[in-house]
C-alpha cells in the first residue's frame, strides 16, 4: 500500500514539474517576442504585453521613436509593421517599411507619435504585438530681457515654453489617454551667462559691465531627462571704471600718466584731490567743517598730469553710460585705501669731500636735491674767494640740477688747490620749505 502511494506521489511531482516547465517556456516565449525600445526614456505597460514608450525629441515636428521586435520562437521569422490610423480605426501598412523575412529581429526608427503593430510569422504560427510611441519635447518660446527691465541695478530675464502633451490613443477603449508626469515640479531650469548661474525660470541678475553682448543660455530639463534650449543676449547698460597711475611716487615735478582701463562708458571724469597737507590746513581754517576736497576735474580719456608741489594725492574716476530709456548709469573708482600718489618732500644734502682724480668716485661737488623750486649755490676757498656759483629759480627735476650745478674742482681751466672749501646753499622746496645749508668740505688730489 505504501509503495503504491509513493509511486502516485512521484508521478504527481513529475506532472507538476512538467507543467511548470511549460509555463516558464510560455512566459519566456511571450517575453522574448515583446516589443522593446532600448532608446526610450520611459515605458509604461497599459495592457498585457502592450507598452507606451516615451522618447526625447527636438520639437513638435521631430520624430525620434524606435521600436524593436524579436522572433518569439528563436527561429528566423518574417516581420510586418503597421501603424494605427485613428480616422479609419484600422491598422495601415507603416509608410516606408519593407517587410523583413528570415531574420531574428526587426527595428523601425524615426517614428512619430502613434500606435504601432508588428505581425511575426515564425514556424507556421503568427503572433501580433503592439506598442505606443510618444515623442516628448520641450520648446522655449520666449527668452528676452526687456529694455525697461534692464537698469543700473540689474536686469530681469523672462522665459516661457511649451511641452509635448504626452497622450496616446488606446484602441481598446477608443479614448485618448494622458501620461501623468511623475513629479509636481517636473521641469528644472538652468541659466548660464558670463560667470552667472541661475536655477529659476525668470531670474533677476545684478548688472554686468561689458562692451559686447553677453549670451545667457537656458536649458530646461524634465523628469525624463529631455531638454529644451533657448538663449538671449544681455546688452549691458552699466560702465566699469578702471585705471592705473604711473609712476606712483617721485620728486616734484612728478609727471604721472593715468592709464585708463574703463569699459562700456560714454564719458569719463577724472577728479584730482588736493594734497593731504592742503586739506588738513583748509579743514583747520574752516573749524573742521566739510570742505571741497576736489582740486580740479579733467575729461580726457587718459590724462597726463604734472604734480608741481609735494604731498600725497588721491584720484578718482567716474564713468558714465548713457541710457535714454532707463537713466544714465555711473561707476566710481577711488584709489585703493592707503594708496596715494606720493610726491616727495624737498631735500638738500651736500658732500663733505671731493676727489677730482677721474676715477669716477666723488670727482665733483654735487648737491643731492629733491623736489626743489629754486636753488643758489656759492663755493668759497679758505680766503673767502668765490670759486663756483649757480642759481636757478624754476627747477623741474633733479636731472637739470645735477647737470648744471656741479663743481668739477676747477677754477676756470686751472685745477683748484687741495684744501678746505666752504659752501652756502639757499633753496626753496616745492613744499614751501626753505632748505638752507652751509658747511665745509675737503678737496683732495691723487687720493684713492
Image (cartoon, rainbow, N blue to C red):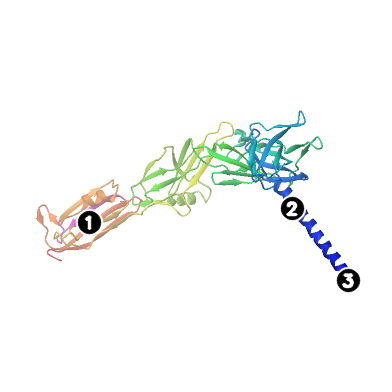
Q: Which residue is mark 2?
A: 25
Residue 439 included in the magenta stretch of the image: no
Q: Report whether residue 261 is seen.
A: yes
Q: Position of residue 213 (x, y in %)?
A: 52, 37
Foreground: disc 3 or disc 2: 3
Element type at mark 2: helix
Foreground: disc 1 or disc 2: 2
Does residue 4 appear left or right of residue 271 in this picture? right
Q: Residue furthest top?
A: 88
How crowded pointer 1 is (Cα within 10 Å; few <14, some 14-19, many 20+) is rated as some
Contact check, label 3 and label 2, Cβ < 8 Å: no
How crowded pointer 2 is (Cα within 10 Å; few <14, some 14-19, many 20+) is rated as few
Which residue range is magenta in the image?
Answer: 372-385
Element type at mark 1: loop
Q: Which residue is mark 3?
A: 2
Towards the viewer: 346 or 51: 51
Q: Which residue is mark 1?
A: 366
Measured Cα–Cα span from mark 1 to mark 3: 138 Å
Amino acid at each position: 500500500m505504501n509503495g503504491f502511494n509513493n509511486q502516485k506521489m512521484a508521478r504527481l511531482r513529475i506532472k507538476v514539474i512538467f507543467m511548470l516547465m511549460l509555463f516558464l517556456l510560455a512566459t519566456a516565449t511571450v517575453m522574448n517576442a515583446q516589443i522593446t525600445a532600448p532608446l526610450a526614456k520611459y515605458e509604461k505597460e497599459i495592457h498585457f504585453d502592450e507598452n507606451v514608450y516615451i522618447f526625447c525629441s527636438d520639437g513638435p515636428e521631430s520624430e525620434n521613436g524606435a521600436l524593436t521586435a524579436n522572433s518569439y520562437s528563436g527561429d528566423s521569422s518574417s516581420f510586418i509593421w503597421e501603424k494605427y490610423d485613428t480616422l479609419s480605426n484600422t491598422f495601415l501598412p507603416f509608410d516606408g517599411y519593407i517587410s523583413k523575412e528570415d531574420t531574428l529581429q526587426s527595428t523601425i526608427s524615426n517614428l512619430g507619435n502613434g500606435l504601432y503593430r508588428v505581425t511575426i510569422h515564425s514556424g507556421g504560427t503568427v503572433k501580433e504585438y503592439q506598442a505606443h510611441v510618444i515623442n516628448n519635447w520641450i520648446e522655449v518660446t520666449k527668452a528676452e530681457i526687456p529694455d525697461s527691465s534692464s537698469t543700473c541695478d540689474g536686469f530681469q530675464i523672462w522665459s516661457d515654453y511649451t511641452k509635448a502633451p504626452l497622450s496616446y490613443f488606446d484602441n481598446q477603449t477608443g479614448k485618448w489617454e494622458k501620461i501623468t508626469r511623475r513629479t509636481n515640479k517636473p521641469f528644472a531650469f538652468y541659466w548660464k551667462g558670463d560667470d552667472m548661474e541661475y536655477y529659476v525660470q525668470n531670474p533677476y541678475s545684478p548688472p554686468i559691465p561689458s562692451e559686447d553682448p553677453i549670451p545667457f543660455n537656458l536649458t530646461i530639463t524634465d523628469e525624463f531627462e529631455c531638454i529644451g534650449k533657448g538663449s538671449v543676449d544681455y546688452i549691458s547698460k552699466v560702465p566699469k571704471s578702471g585705471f592705473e597711475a604711473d609712476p606712483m611716487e617721485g620728486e616734484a615735478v612728478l609727471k604721472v600718466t593715468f592709464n585708463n582701463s574703463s569699459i562700456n562708458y560714454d564719458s569719463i571724469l577724472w577728479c584730482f584731490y588736493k594734497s593731504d597737507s592742503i586739506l588738513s590746513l583748509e579743514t583747520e581754517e574752516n573749524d573742521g567743517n566739510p570742505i571741497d576736497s576736489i582740486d580740479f576735474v579733467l575729461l580726457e580719456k587718459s590724462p597726463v598730469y604734472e604734480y608741481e608741489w609735494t604731498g600725497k594725492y588721491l584720484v578718482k574716476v567716474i564713468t558714465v553710460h548713457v541710457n535714454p530709456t532707463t537713466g544714465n548709469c555711473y561707476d566710481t573708482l577711488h584709489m585703493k585705501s592707503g594708496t596715494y600718489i606720493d610726491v616727495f618732500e624737498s631735500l638738500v644734502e651736500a658732500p663733505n669731500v671731493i676727489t677730482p682724480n677721474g676715477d669716477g668716485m666723488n670727482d665733483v661737488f654735487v648737491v643731492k636735491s629733491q623736489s626743489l623750486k629754486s636753488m643758489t649755490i656759492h663755493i668759497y676757498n679758505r680766503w673767502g674767494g668765490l670759486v663756483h656759483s649757480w642759481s636757478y629759480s624754476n627747477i623741474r627735476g633733479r636731472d637739470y640740477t645735477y647737470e648744471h650745478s656741479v663743481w668739477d674742482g676747477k677754477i676756470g681751466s686751472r685745477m683748484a688747490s687741495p684744501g678746505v672749501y666752504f659752501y652756502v646753499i639757499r633753496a626753496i622746496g616745492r613744499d614751501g620749505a626753505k632748505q638752507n645749508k652751509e658747511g665745509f668740505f675737503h678737496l683732495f688730489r691723487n687720493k684713492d
